Amino acid sequence: MLLSTPGKLARIAVLGACTLLVQAPCSAQDTKADDVVSTPEEIFDEIWGEFHDRYAFFELRGVDWDKQRETYKARVNSKTTDDELFSILSEMLAPLGDAHVNLIMKGEKRRAFCAEKTARFEREFSTDDLLKQFWSLVDGTLEARGFGESVKVAKVFHYRRNSDYGYLRITDLEGPKKKALDKGLDQILDALQDTQGLIIDIRANPGGTDDFVYRIMRRFADKKRVGHYKKTKKGPGDDEFGKLRTRHFEPGGDVRYAGKIVLLQNDASYSAADMFAMLMGDLPNVVSIGEHTNGVFSDMLVRKLPNGWKYTLSHQRYYSAAKVCYEGKGIPADHKVLNVRADLETGVDPVIPKALTLLTEEELSPR
C-alpha cells in the first residue's frame, strides 16, 4: 500500500536524517556514479537479494521470500518503466506488513511506499481532522476531572495535573538534545513530584530513538535493570546473526518519579514507543491500558540502489529482559480499552477514567 495516513507520512519523511536509521557500508553497486542506472532486472535482483540476506523476520511475518521472487521477477524486463518497477517492488514488499520496510523513489516522480499495515487506531482516526478531534477529546476529558492547562516542554512533552494526579503526553521520542531533554524532565517531574500517581500517554506516538527512551527511563528506574537484548542479521541463513548484545538502564537525573504510573498505549505506538512500553512494563509500579503497541523494534537499515532510490529493512531482533521478541506483536496492555471514532460522540476518552481508577488500586504500590 502507498503511504496514506498522517502517521506514515511523518515517519517516512525522516529517512536519511533519523538516528534510528543505520546506513550500511556501500556495496560495489552502491558506489556507482549517480548517472549510471542499472537495468530493471538488476534493480529487482539487488533489493530482493539484500532482503534475502539481511531481513530478520520472514518466518515471523509469514512470507516465503523465494516465492515472492518467483511471482514478481517474471513481471520485470528491460522495458519495465520506473513507475511499473516501483509498483512491482511495492507489491512484493507489502506482505511483510512491517512499518520499517520502505521504498523511496527520488526525483521528479518522487514516490514513497511503506509496508506497514494500517494500525486499528489510524483506521478509526484516519484524517488529520479526526486525530485533532481525538486529542481535543482527551483534553476535555482531563479538564472535566480537574486537570489544569497543558504545559508544553522541550517540544515533545505536554504535562498537566489536578490536585491528586499528573498527566504527561509524549508526542515523539526524539528531537530535543540531551541538555534540553534533561531540563524539560526536571521541570515536569518537579511539578508533578507531590502527586499520588502519574498517567503517561504514548498513544499515536511515531517513535524515535533508543537513546532518547533510555534517557527518559533513568527518571523512572527503581534499580539497574536489563532494558533489552539485540542481535543483528549478518547473512542469508536463518541463524546468521551476530552476538547478542545487552543494554541496561538505571536511576539517573536530578529529579526522578517513584509514584504509581499508568501507561496509555495503542497500536499506533511505534518503534521507540514500543521500546518505551516494554521497558516501563518491567517496573513494579507501572500498569498499562489500551491495546498492544505496533511491534516494530528493529532499527532501519538504509540501502541506496544504483538508480538513486532508497529502501529500508528490519535487520535486528530485539528481546525483552525476559528474552521475548515482541516484533510483529507489540507489547500487550494489562487492561484492554480501545479508542473508537464513536468516542467523539460520547465526549469522553474512556481510557482516562480507567487510568484514574487504576491509580487508586492497592496493587499499584509506589516504590
Image (tube, grey):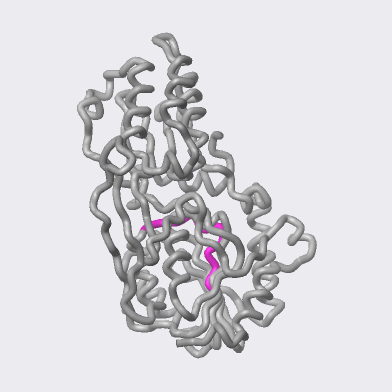
User: In what quadrant of the picture does the N terminus appear?
Assistant: top right
View extreme (top): residue? 79
Residue 25 is one of the magenta-drawn residues: no
x, y percentage for residue 347?
A: 76, 66
Confirm whether the magenta stretch covers residue 201: yes
The picture quadrant where one finds residue 117 is: top right
Q: Is residue 182 left or right of residue 70?
A: left
Q: Which residues are magenta?
A: 200-209
Q: Main secondary structure of the magenta part?
A: loop
Residue extending furthest toward the right:
345
Residue 175 in view here: no
Q: Please provide percent x and percent y for residue 221.
A: 38, 78
Compared to residue 167, the image places residue 120 above or below, namely above
Residue located 50% across and 62% down the image: 171
Is 125 located above or below residue 82 in the figure?
below
Q: Quadrant of residue 107?
A: top left
Along the line of sight, the residue nearer the viewer: 214 or 82: 214
Where in the figure is residue 145, as x and y percent of width and height? 69, 80
Rendered position, 141 above or below 265: below
Q: Nearer the viewer, residue 361 or 176?
A: 361
- The residue depicted at 33 percent of the width and 28 percent of the height is 49
> Residue at left 63%, top 50%?
120
Task: Answer with left or right where residue 233 lies relative to residue 359.
Answer: left
Instruction: For residue 186, say whether it is visible.
Output: yes
